[in-house]
């Protein structure tokens, strides 16, 4: 059996490579190889989950259970604090917390994507992108486990779900997490304290972002700098609105799409510059 | 044409102290002219490979010898594409298998079968290819029912047998080996020798780093000595 490192390069990649600088061309190869080796990163992601929850009763649903308990206990108290009705608030809180857990896990895990893979990266030539994709995929799997909570709650509370819109928004959010992941992974491999800085920032962002509270609770029509200038707000709103209201603010959609396009262009450029150095930083 | 061509390859490792890895220190030192965070920008560099030029052509069995720390493993990694040279170039034509660590990626909590799937995926095999080889690998390793048990229940010898069976089941044009593989008890090592010899004979190029000059003399047609990152033919 022949081990193929680079499967047949698609015509697009070949066309693009002829027109790009050497660094960019190698970066494109890395991206392309990363996506092609989906057997490896999906297997690794699943094995990581299996290993983490081996010899436990509920497996990944332990996280689901603890999230559910958090929501069930925080819900009633904060509904009262916010002066909101339980019916209204509970669905909002549950959706927000499930989605926030995914966002923060994705961002934090991507910081250490390369560092955690040091052994493999120094043993075999592998596309760096593979590890970003693996960690994102693993977190999506865990999100799906956690979304069981939402499916159960949908039976009791009003959710207006728009599936096609949700899938579109989901893709846009993941594209944003992807470019942020690439940039952070590179920076955190070179500067080992950035990972901790990001963890702290995300924790603070939890309180500054409308997760447990709604923008309308701020008064003044829900407009405030902490909402308008908060990138987390736009991401979580894109996720949340198609599940709760069946629609999404078109402005938010445009902002997130623009961010996905520009962000990925920047991340690709940054990646092309720093890609070869990553192995030396490990 | 399968080949590896190295031209004036240099590999420089930056050595970052703990302050060099901190973005806070690097940032502060640029603000304060280096007084507060002394050493943040003192990045020492170790030149692991220096001006390496040679070529491996189809049919070559290349032996790399040298003391510990001379750069053998670094050179193999550079040839495998793991470290891109700081200067110079390496041109590889053909598929490469780097057998630098045959246990890399194996997980103690997963079963023998799962580890086969993991390792073969790491070596670049598709799911169908791996599925076809699983039984052959399991049979060769002679582990019987242990294949369904987690790797942590294996003795180190058993784990190495599994790793060896997996590593010797793939084919490639170019084989990079860091020390010759020898595993298992007397019985296993006999059939292992046959299997490894067969794998090596099918490779168009073999690059072997070894401490044993006898082995290199017996096996290799091109021999090089590495000293402090510099190479010379012997």
Image (cartoon, rainbow, N blue to C red):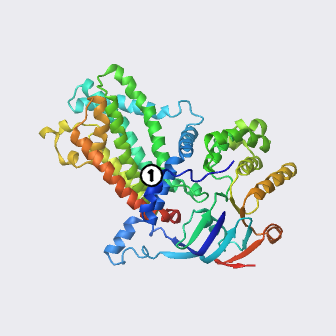
User: Which residue is at the front of the view, A17 or A87?
Assistant: A17
In the image, residue A64 lies at what x, y percent?
44, 32
Q: Residue furthest left?
A: A220
User: Which residue is at the front of the view, A86 or A216?
Assistant: A216
The chain containing the residue under callout 1 comes to A
Q: Compared with residue B101, is residue A175 higher up or lower down, i.e. above or below?
A: above
In the image, residue B147 lies at what x, y percent?
72, 38
Which residue occupies 51% across, 56% down?
A115
Which residue occupies 42% across, 73% down?
B40
Residue B230 seen? yes
Q: Is residue A260 left or right of residue B122?
A: left
In the image, residue A67 lies at what x, y percent?
41, 33
Image quarter of residue B148:
top right
In the image, residue A93 lies at what x, y percent?
31, 32
Tag 1 residue = A12
Q: Compared with residue B131, is residue A189 higher up or lower down, i.e. above or below?
A: below
Q: Residue furthest top?
A: A155
Image quarter of residue A250:
top left
Q: Compared with residue B31, is residue A252 higher up or lower down, i.e. above or below?
A: above
- Tally the marks: 1
Image quarter of residue A244:
top left
Q: Is residue A135 left or right of residue B59?
A: left
Circle 1 crowding by C-alpha within 10 Å: few under 14, some 14–19, many from 20: few
User: Which residue is at the front of the view, A248 or A21?
Assistant: A21
Which residue occupies 47% across, 50% down?
A132
Q: Secondary structure at mark 1?
A: helix
Q: Compared with residue B222, is residue A266 higher up or lower down, i.e. above or below?
A: above
Q: Is residue B190 left or right of residue B136?
A: right
């Amino acid at each position: 059996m022949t081990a193929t490192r680079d499967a047949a390069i698609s015509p697009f990649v070949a066309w693009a490579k002829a027109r790009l600088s050497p660094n960019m061309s190698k970066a494109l190869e890395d991206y392309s190889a990363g996506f092609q080796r989906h057997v490896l990163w999906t297997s690794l992601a699943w094995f990581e989950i299996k290993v983490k929850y081996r010899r436990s009763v509920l497996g990944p649903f332990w996280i689901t259970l603890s999230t559910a308990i958090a929501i069930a206990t925080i819900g009633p108290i904060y509904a009262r604090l916010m002066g909101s009705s339980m019916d209204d608030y509970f669905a909002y809180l549950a959706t927000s917390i499930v989605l926030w857990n995914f966002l923060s896990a994705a961002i934090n895990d991507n910081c250490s994507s390369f560092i955690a893979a040091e052994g493999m990266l120094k043993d075999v030539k592998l596309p760096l992108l593979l590890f970003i994709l693996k960690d994102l995929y693993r977190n999506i799997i865990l999100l799906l486990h956690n979304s069981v909570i939402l499916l159960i709650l949908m039976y009791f509370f009003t959710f207006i779900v728009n599936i096609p819109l949700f899938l579109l928004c989901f893709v846009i959010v993941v594209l944003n997490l992807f470019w942020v992941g690439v940039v952070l992974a590179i920076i955190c491999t070179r500067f080992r304290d950035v990972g901790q800085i990001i963890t702290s920032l995300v924790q603070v962002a939890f309180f500054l972002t409308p997760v447990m509270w709604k923008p309308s609770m701020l008064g003044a029509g829900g407009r405030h700098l902490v909402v308008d200038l908060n990138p987390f707000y736009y991401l979580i709103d894109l996720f949340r609105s198609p599940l709760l209201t069946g629609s999404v603010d078109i402005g938010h959609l445009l902002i997130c799409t623009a961010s996905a396009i520009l962000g990925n262009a920047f991340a690709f450029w940054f990646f092309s510059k720093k890609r070869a150095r990553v192995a030396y930083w490990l | 044409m399968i080949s590896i061509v190295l031209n004036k390859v240099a590999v420089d490792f930056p050595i970052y102290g703990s302050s060099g890895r901190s973005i806070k220190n690097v940032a502060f030192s640029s603000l304060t002219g280096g007084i507060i965070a002394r050493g943040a920008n003192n990045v020492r560099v170790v030149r692991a490979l220096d001006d390496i030029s040679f070529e491996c052509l189809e049919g070559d069995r290349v032996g790399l010898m040298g003391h510990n720390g001379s750069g053998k493993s670094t050179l193999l990694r550079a040839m495998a594409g793991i470290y891109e040279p700081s200067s110079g170039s390496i041109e590889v034509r053909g598929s490469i298998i780097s057998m630098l660590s045959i246990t890399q990626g194996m997980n103690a909590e997963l079963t023998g079968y799962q580890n086969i799937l993991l390792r073969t995926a790491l070596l670049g095999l598709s799911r169908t290819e791996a599925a076809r080889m699983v039984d052959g690998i399991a049979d060769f390793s002679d582990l019987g029912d242990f294949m369904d048990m987690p790797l942590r229940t294996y003795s180190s010898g058993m784990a190495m047998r599994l790793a060896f069976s997996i590593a010797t089941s793939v084919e490639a044009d170019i084989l990079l080996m860091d020390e010759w593989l020898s595993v298992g008890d007397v019985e296993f090592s006999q059939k292992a020798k046959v299997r490894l010899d067969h794998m090596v004979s099918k490779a168009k190029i073999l690059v072997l780093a070894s401490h044993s000059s006898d082995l290199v003399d017996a096996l290799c047609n091109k021999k090089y000595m590495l000293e402090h990152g510099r190479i010379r033919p012997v």
